[in-house]
Image (spheres, rainbow, N blue to C red):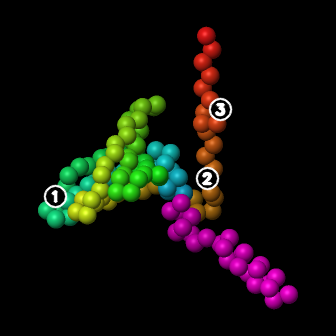
Amino acid sequence: MKKIIGLLLVTALVGCAKEADVASKNMSVAADQFEVNRRVVFYNGITGEYMLTVEGLCALGNWDKHKELSITCKVGPSAYKKHFLGLSDNVTYFVEQLEPNKVSTYHYRVVFKPSLVIPDIEVK
């Protein structure tokens, strides 16, 4: 009986996310949908100089290789640009959100894009 009560308690605690965690996750989803205006700055930690700035509706790469960062930016209704940047011991970056973003802490988002599931078929 104690094991069952303990298991139920652990399950209940895992299901209760902090409000900040929910808001953070929802903002990450919004950024991946190109809904968040960002500025990404790369700078040299030794000289203190900025090396590159990328600004706009940009999403950071999710599956980048070690010491590499990709940034994909939406530049038109169906136009995108992708940048690859190498990181080193003295080159790092930071991302600034330029405007507040309204996200709900009471709801979660599921983004389903049929175009990614159903292939584009060309008929001749």
Q: Nearer the viewer, residue 113 or 82?
A: 82
Q: Nearer the viewer, mark 1 or mark 2?
A: 1
Magenta-drawn stretch contains 73: no
Which residue occupies the foreground of this view, 92 or 68?
68
Q: CA distance from mark 3 to mark 2?
A: 21 Å
Q: Nearer the viewer, residue 75 or 105?
A: 75
Q: Main secondary structure of the magenta part?
A: helix
Q: Which residues are magenta?
A: 1-25
Residue most extreme to the top:
124
User: Which label is found at residue 49?
Assistant: 1
What secondary structure is found at the residue carrying circle 2?
loop
**Label 2: few (<14), some or many (≥20) within 10 Å?**
few
Residue at the (52%, 69%) spot, across then down: 20
Disc 3 marks which amino acid? Ile
Does label 1 or label 2 sit earlier along the sequence?
Answer: 1
Disc 2: which residue: 109
Element carrying mark 3: loop
Q: Which residue bears the numbered disc 3?
A: 118
| Front tag of 3 and 2 | 3
Question: What's under tag 1, amino acid-wise?
Answer: Glu
How busy is the neighbourhood of tag 3: few (under 14 within 10 Å), some, or many (20 plus)? few
Residue 74, visible in the rendered structure = yes
Between the C-alphas of marks 3 and 1, the distance is 46 Å
